[in-house]
Amino acid sequence: MTQRTSVEQTPLRIKRGSSKKGFFPYRFEYDPHKRSSSFMVSTVSVVIALIICAIFIGLNGLNPLTVYLKMVQGAFGSAFGISETLVKATPLLLCGLGVAIAYRISIWNIGAEGQFLLGAIGATAVTIYLPNLPGALFIPIMMLVGVVSGAVWGLFTAIPRTYFQVNELITSLMLNYVALLLLDYFVFEPWRDPQGFNFPGTPLFSPFQMLATIGNTRLNHGLIYALVAVLVFAFLLSKTKWGYELRILGANPTAAIYSGIKVNKHILLVMMISGGLAGLAGAIEVSGVAHRLMYGISPGYGYTAIIVAWLAKLNPWAMIFTSVFIGGLIVGGYSVQTIGLPSSISLMLQGAILLCLIGGEMISKYRIKRVSEEA
């Protein structure tokens, strides 16, 4: 008789009390197949995170409701605030889509930050080494090179994972720091603007190398690219054979292997797409927002995108709203500086949301059962 060792096969039971007098007639039972409302888990996680942060705000002698209202007004209370929120939401949405597609097959890519930076470097290289391109081709080629740069950087994680079973968490995280050092090298040395008063950055791009803006704001056509990416991503996942195979691979890798799905091929392709989307975000950032490559071009979009993806439960349509929500937190964080709080309050909120999401996901897999005293 074969002993069952899988957690999924043997539910975890935690009994409280004993069979003697005072027996507590309930037990907590782990059920990996238990379905819970994704919307409910995300909503409750955000509410709990807001309550936790409200405690710390109160300890600083401020009214949490006043602070949160100030954040909402800063992010959504004016045309400028809304446009800045969407500026922040654009790279978050693209990087979030990238990590989501990897997480769907249990490839834990946390290298979107490095892939974002490589996309920014690649797009900038086009402006420096191919300055005589026809104006109409500049933006498409910059975006394409940004995508390819991010995709290749993603392969540096996928190849060790596929052929040598190297943990992708470690390689993708380490490559973020390599990408950051590459960025520092270029903006401090060969690409530094000689007329930039020693500022670590390239010269400003020419007007035909910049993405068109929407109105008199910093919001640019990169938002349209991001929304198109959502549409394509959603279609591929739900309407194609490739999307079906990804769902099988994510749900049961063993079944995927026995059904003839080429797992290694899918891992390589998914990591290229994941890196390519983050690379596109980087290209959009230098071309449409910063208009140059500079030190600190990313405030951590690749890491924050993980929260965007998990808050949306990897749903591409929901990521539109979660990216706007997190973008609003970032912009709202700037607003609270006027009432005596640092902008890092938004980082504390993001961290609290992520922790609550992880905890909520775990707790949602448990159920409480009543048992008899004789049990």
Image (cartoon, rainbow, N blue to C red):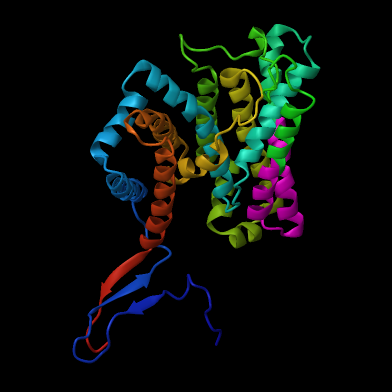
Residue pictured at 32% horizontal, 67% vertical: 367
The picture places residue 163, in percent across and down from the top left corner, at 76, 56
The correct choice, above or below, for 122 with respect to 212 in the image is below
Residue pictured at 70% horizontal, 7% vertical: 135
Q: Is residue 170 visible?
A: yes
The picture places residue 264, in percent across and down from the top left corner, at 71, 52
Tell me the quarter of the picture where residue 197 sits. top right
Residue pictured at 64% horizontal, 25% vertical: 283
**Observer-nearest of 206 and 281:** 206
Residue pushed farthest left? Answer: 21
The correct choice, above or below, for 140 with respect to 328 in the image is above
Q: Quadrant of the C terminus?
A: bottom left
**Observer-nearest of 208 and 234:** 208
Residue 358 is covered by the magenta coloring: no
Residue 159 is covered by the magenta coloring: yes
The correct choice, above or below, for 136 with respect to 14 in the image is above
Please state the extent of the stretch shown in magenta in the rendering. 148-177
The picture places residue 23, in percent across and down from the top left corner, at 22, 85
The picture places residue 174, in percent across and down from the top left corner, at 68, 49
Q: Main secondary structure of the magenta part?
A: helix
Tell me the quarter of the picture where residue 284 sits. top right
**Observer-nearest of 15 and 372:** 15
Q: Quadrant of the N terminus?
A: bottom right
Q: Is residue 314 visible?
A: no
352 sits left or right of 339 in the view: right
26 sits left or right of 120 in the view: left
Number of numbered discs on residues: 0
